[in-house]
Image: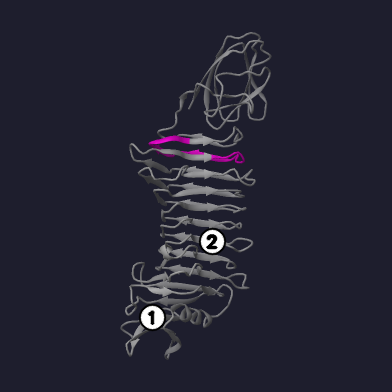
């Protein structure tokens, strides 16, 4: 036994054959030897027994190590029912392609449900593959967290579920996913209850890769790869979100937009930095939209991203995002001469305007999101004033101007009876 097991875990789960029947056993490691916890032909039953043998203590995780299956009908452990985790546990396996937990047909459930009365429970998954067998299961999630404070995934693979992770706890939690593969699911990581999260160095190949909503607090999405249809959707976000150094690429099957700030909920004062990402679609199959900013977002900063073969790198639903910035994005900035830079309803100047010039006299027009150069001449009764973001007068050049304006700065063309001709170049 010592050649097959290592005694680094509290409990070892493994399979063996006795009298021609494959069994699964859970054994506790002790200084004096091994104690049998449970032995059964049903993997879920053995796992539940192993979990129940661990302490239900805050800030202390018991350790269950799952060995490579050697005697199962296939190369995986068959999961026939939900595994309820009602205490803090660290689950580890021999490796991604060596320890595979696969749903049986028509389970249609969560593979792991984290539920308890503990307030400081931490659950960890490492070096394990969860397979939802979605071809034979209509619904189901890899992990549903209803109670645990922290959930950590390191070097895991979750595939073929409706959702990788579903957050059900009422007040959210803390999540840290590192080096994981999320493949072939309908939905993705689903943060919906105010949790904080870090997702780094992960790979997504799914329809909707990532969802943050319902007052999710603070998050970092860093160094991840999204292939063909990996969309990040953000709704009703209530904190700070950094999306940096990620790579979206594909051959035209990509869901558009790649990052979608949806027009749902109230996201005012949520701060998001989109920095250093790369959006690449193969020639002949362009991505329609890279980043879409909805009507309720006012602090989205899109800086130093690379857009290649993207038809519309950034779109803004309305000119309401006066506090955000769109600058220094290769293949997009500088934008250059803009034929319709004016919004004469919301009174902004940007790449998302609808008119060639101002139509409302004595009206403050605010520069939106990107610096621009403005040349104004002609008209009747024009008296131009330049103001800072707070409305303080910087200069009053008079009937004409040749000026550079920063985002949120203001230009007023005075009480004209005939509008001037205005040329706008956006950086």
Mark 2, other Cα within 10 Å: few <14 / some 14–19 / many ≥20: many
Please rate how many residues cluster around mark 1, counting C-alpha atoms within 10 Å: few if below 14, some from 14 to 19, many from 20: many
- Split into 4 quadrants, where in the image is the N terminus? bottom left
Is 312 included in the stretch rendered in magenta?
yes
Tell me if 26 is positioned left or right of 382 in this view: left
Front position in the image: 176 or 49: 49
Query: Quarter of the image holding residue 288?
Result: top left
Query: Foreground: 186 or 418?
Result: 186
Q: Position of residue 53 (x, y in %)?
A: 52, 83
Magenta region: 293-313
Q: Position of residue 375 (x, y in %)?
A: 53, 16
Q: Which residue is mark 1?
A: 14
Left or right: where does residue 45 sit relative to residue 238? left
Give above or below for 347 relative to 280.
above
Residue shown at 49%/74% (left/top)?
A: 81
Disc with the residue nearer the chain's start (1 vs 2)? 1
**x, y percentage for residue 126?**
42, 68
Q: Residue 373 location in percent, x, y?
A: 52, 22
Q: Is residue 42 above or below residue 347?
A: below
Determine which of the numbered discs, if any, sits on residue 166 in the image.
2
Please give the name of the residue rendered at 52% of the width and 44% of the height, measured from the top-left corner.
Answer: 260
Residue 158 makes an appearance in the image: no
- Mark 2 element type: strand
Q: Secondary structure at mark 1?
A: strand
Q: Is residue 147 magenta?
A: no
Spatial CA distance of label 1 from label 2 is 28 Å
* 174 w.r.t. 341: above or below: below
Q: Which is more toward the observer, 196 or 386?
A: 196
């Amino acid at each position: 036994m010592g050649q097959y097991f290592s005694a680094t875990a509290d409990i070892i789960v493994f399979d063996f054959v006795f009298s021609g029947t494959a069994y699964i056993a859970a054994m506790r490691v002790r200084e004096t030897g091994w104690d049998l916890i449970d032995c059964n032909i049903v993997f879920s039953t053995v796992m539940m027994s192993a979990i129940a043998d661990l302490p239900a203590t805050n800030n202390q995780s018991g350790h269950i190590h799952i060995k490579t299956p050697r005697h199962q009908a296939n190369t995986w452990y068959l999961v026939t029912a939900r595994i309820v985790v009602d205490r803090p546990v660290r689950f580890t396996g021999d490796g991604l392609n060596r320890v595979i937990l696969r749903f049986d047909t028509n389970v249609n459930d969560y593979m792991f449900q984290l539920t308890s009365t503990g307030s400081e429970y931490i659950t960890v998954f490492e070096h394990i593959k969860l397979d939802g067998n979605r071809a034979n299961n209509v619904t189901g999630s890899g992990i549903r967290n209803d109670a645990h404070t922290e959930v950590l995934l390191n070097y895991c693979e979750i595939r073929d579920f409706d959702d990788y992770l579903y957050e059900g706890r009422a007040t959210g939690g803390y999540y840290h996913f590192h080096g994981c593969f999320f493949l072939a699911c309908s939905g993705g990581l689903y943060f919906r209850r105010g949790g904080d999260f870090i997702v780094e160095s992960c790979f997504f190949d799914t329809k909707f890769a990532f969802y943050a909503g319902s007052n999710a607090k603070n998050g970092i999405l860093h160094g991840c790869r999204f292939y063909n249809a990996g969309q990040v959707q953000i709704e009703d976000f209530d904190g700070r979100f950094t999306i940096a150094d990620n790579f979206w690429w594909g051959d035209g099957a990509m869901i558009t937009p790649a990052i979608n700030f949806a027009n749902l909920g109230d996201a005012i004062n949520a701060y998001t930095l989109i920095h250093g990402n790369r959006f690449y679609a193969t020639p002949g199959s362009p991505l329609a939209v890279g980043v879409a900013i909805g009507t309720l977002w006012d602090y989205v900063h899109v800086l130093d991203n690379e857009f290649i073969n993207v038809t519309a790198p950034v779109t803004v639903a309305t000119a309401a995002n006066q506090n955000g910035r769109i600058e220094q994005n290769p293949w997009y900035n500088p934008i250059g001469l803009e034929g319709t830079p004016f919004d004469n309803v919301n009174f902004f100047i940007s790449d998302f305007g609808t008119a060639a010039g101002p139509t409302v006299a004595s009206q403050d027009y605010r520069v939106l999101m990107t610096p621009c150069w403005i040349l104004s001449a002609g008209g009747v009764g024009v008296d131009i004033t330049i103001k800072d973001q707070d409305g303080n007068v910087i200069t009053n050049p008079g009937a004409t101007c040749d000026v550079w304006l920063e985002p949120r700065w203001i230009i007023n063309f005075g009480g004209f009876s005939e509008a001037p001709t205005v040329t706008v170049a956006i950086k």
